[in-house]
Amino acid sequence: MFKYQAKQKVCNIGGVKVGGQLGENPPLLIGNMFQKGDLILEDRKGGKFDRKAAEERIRELEKISRETGVPCLIAMVANSEEEVKGYIDFFTSVTEMPFAIDIWQQKTRLAAARYIAKRGLQARALYNSITPWDEDINAQVSELRELGIKHVVIQVFDMEDKRPTGRVKSLKNLLPLVEKGNFESILVDTAVMNLPATAFSLVANTLIKNEFGFPVGFAPSNGTYMWRKAASEQDKDKFPAIDAGVHAISALASDFLFCGPLTGTSRVFPAVAAACSMMAALAFEESNLLPSGNHPLNLLFPDVVKQFEKEKGEK
């Protein structure tokens, strides 16, 4: 019941494992930095930002990741080549954490990939993303292969079929092109369009893992922050609970989640840690296997793990 049929691909991005059977590895949480409205930005065009505040956010993220057992990386949002170069230089000077780029325009995205290759950072960089809307996917994949880019996200969506089946169809169309890149890691983003339709992404995740075994995920924050923007003033105080709850539910069938601004980590990480601990317990019920290492179940519920191990020995 809780085991996917296809052999699951477990990717290693800068030392972080992503993917696997349900309950095996906690989902990777990917938070944004330098997005529109980020208070640490001082001048986007000039690439100026509060470096002290930015480093403090990184340290806070590293700390909550250690405490909860939920792995993390930061996606740097940029609009220009010079901007992303500055962000990458800053980030790699203060932490060994893997990172992602979050760039919509293909031209700027590829410029970032060239700089990542120039700096020799391919092993710890996640290219986000190859999309169905890109102008020339073949040329993009070819250049990424030449640059030695190792880890990519592909976003799947079908404008004519916005249900889970459309996302699977989109993957089948993109995959022959993307696989030409010989990437070590292919992560599939099943595209959230609004909060209720997050359910479609969850179903698509399950279908894709069952058939292909790829690590899957999406951005629950797209739905939750869209809701907050549209909500009345009297409803906005409900946002923290909604955001945490949606991320926790999403974690039950995802290998990675784009969780939005880093200001939300204090609510999202504990919620996801609790959810994947529950999923690990469900997996134990079926397989009699327990997760290893710093999995949230082991960190947060050591007494429960001891009881499970005792029951395992008695079977």
Image: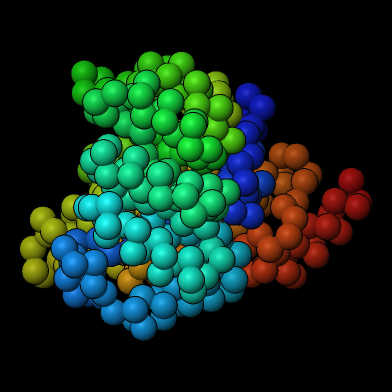
Q: In this view, does 138 lie above or below 221?
A: above
Q: Which of 217 and 230 is in front in this view?
A: 217
Specify whether 156 is left or right of 239. right
Name the foreground residue: 44 vs 193.
Answer: 44
Q: What residue is at 67 percent from the left and 68 percent from the top?
A: 299
Q: Can residue 44 be seen in this view?
A: yes
Q: Quadrant of residue 77?
A: bottom left
Q: Residue 14 or 277: which is nearer the viewer?
A: 14
In percent of width and height, residue 30 lies at 43, 56
Q: Please state if 12 lies on the left or on the right of 168 as rendered.
A: right
Image location (x, y in percent) of residue 43:
17, 70
Can you name the residue that lies furthest to the front here?
118
Q: Quadrant of residue 268?
A: bottom left
Residue 258 x, y percent position in the rendering: 38, 52
Residue 249 in sight from this viewpoint = no
Q: Image height check: is 70 above or below 218? A: below
Figure disc tally: 0
Outermost residue on the right side: it is: 314
> Looking at the picture, does residue 181 appear above or below residue 272?
above
Task: Identify the residue at image location x=34%, y=79%.
Answer: 51
Q: Is 290 placed left or right of 133 in the picture?
A: right
Residue drawn at point x = 91 percent, y = 51 percent: 314
Residue at 13% from the left image edge and 58% from the top image edge: 229
Please, which colouring scheme is shown? rainbow
**Looking at this rendering, what residue extends furthest in the bottom direction?**
52
Q: Position of residue 49 (x, y in %)?
A: 26, 74
On-image quarter of the N terminus:
top right
